[in-house]
Image: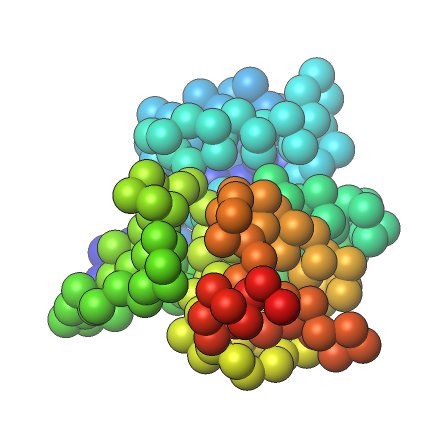
């Protein structure tokens, strides 16, 4: 398999060198950037396989960098792992809302960081010999796993990676009730460090983007969420 390239946007030279050392030793090609503007330029000119992004950067914050990357169709599909000392719940929620694929808090174990990177890259890689599947249909809502597309009344809706994973996971099992942590395990992998609140934020975003069909995602008080079997059930 061709060598995968990771862009590290980190202003701390010691941390950047630590990350670079372990990535190179694990077989990755590494691009480095000490600040945001340079990182954005490198991302668009080289389109790396993954971006490690610090939130606390000079001049332009990691949050703003993430927003710009996700707004640019040329690089919007590049997975982002945020690496930061900010571990409060609000920061984790912001990162997920922006479309970050994972969130690692400093200080971190290099082994854990590498495991997260491999997990994100594995989720992004299409399976060998993958075939286009029949879309899931619920009235005017269509969810196509093979194409990773969602259409509402014939119009395509743009979802983040995590939003699509959650939607497809629930819609593929209509009527089944899942806890927030079951949803996290299914779409991110076991032991992913995310809060109940972060899952709720993803659901709120999904409902908003799906418009009238957001009602299919039902809250089961005290338990979690389920996808309605039918429009009639969704109205109840």
Look at the picture and state if 206 lies above or below 65.
Answer: below
Q: Residue at x 57, y 30 (%)?
A: 67
Residue 170 point in image, percent of width and height: 50, 71
Residue 126 picture location, percent across and down: 27, 63
Q: Position of residue 193 (x, y in %)?
A: 71, 67
Looking at the image, is 17 positioned above or below residue 109?
above
Judge by depth and name the residue closer to the eye, 73 or 2: 73
**Residue 11 shows in the view:** no
Name the outermost residue toward the right: 88
Figure coloring: rainbow
Name the side, left or right, on which 118 lies relative to 130.
right
Name the quadrant containing residue 185.
bottom right
Residue placed most toward the observer, 107 or 77: 77
Q: Measuring 43% from the left and 66% from the top, which residue is drawn there? A: 168
Quarter of the image with the C terminus is bottom right
Q: Quadrant of residue 226?
A: bottom right
1 relative position to 136: left or right: left
Depicted 103 relative to depicted 72: above or below: below
- Residue 72 visible in rendering: yes
The answer to which of 166 and 230 lies nearer the viewer is 230
């Amino acid at each position: 398999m061709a060598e995968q390239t990771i862009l590290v946007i980190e202003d701390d030279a010691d941390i950047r060198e630590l990350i670079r050392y372990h990535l190179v030793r694990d077989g990755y090609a590494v691009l480095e950037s000490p600040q945001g503007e340079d990182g954005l330029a490198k991302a668009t000119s080289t389109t790396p396989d993954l971006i490690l992004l610090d939130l606390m950067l000079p001049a332009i914050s990691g949050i703003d960098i993430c927003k710009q990357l996700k707004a640019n169709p040329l690089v919007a599909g590049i997975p982002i792992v945020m690496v930061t000392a900010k571990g409060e719940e609000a920061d984790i929620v912001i990162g997920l809302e922006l479309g970050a694929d994972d969130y690692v808090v400093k200080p971190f174990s290099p082994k854990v960081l590498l495991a997260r990177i491999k997990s994100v890259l594995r989720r992004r890689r299409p399976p060998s010999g993958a075939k286009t599947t029949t879309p899931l249909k619920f009235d005017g809502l269509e969810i196509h796993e093979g194409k990773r597309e969602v259409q509402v009344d014939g119009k395509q809706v743009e979802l983040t990676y995590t939003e699509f994973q959650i939607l497809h996971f629930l819609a593929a099992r209509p009527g089944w009730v899942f806890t927030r942590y079951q949803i996290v395990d299914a779409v991110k992998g076991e032991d992913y460090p995310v809060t109940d609140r972060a899952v709720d934020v993803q659901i709120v975003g999904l409902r908003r983007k799906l418009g009238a069909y957001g009602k299919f995602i039902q809250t089961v008080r005290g338990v979690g969420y389920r996808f309605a079997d039918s429009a009639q059930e969704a109205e109840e």
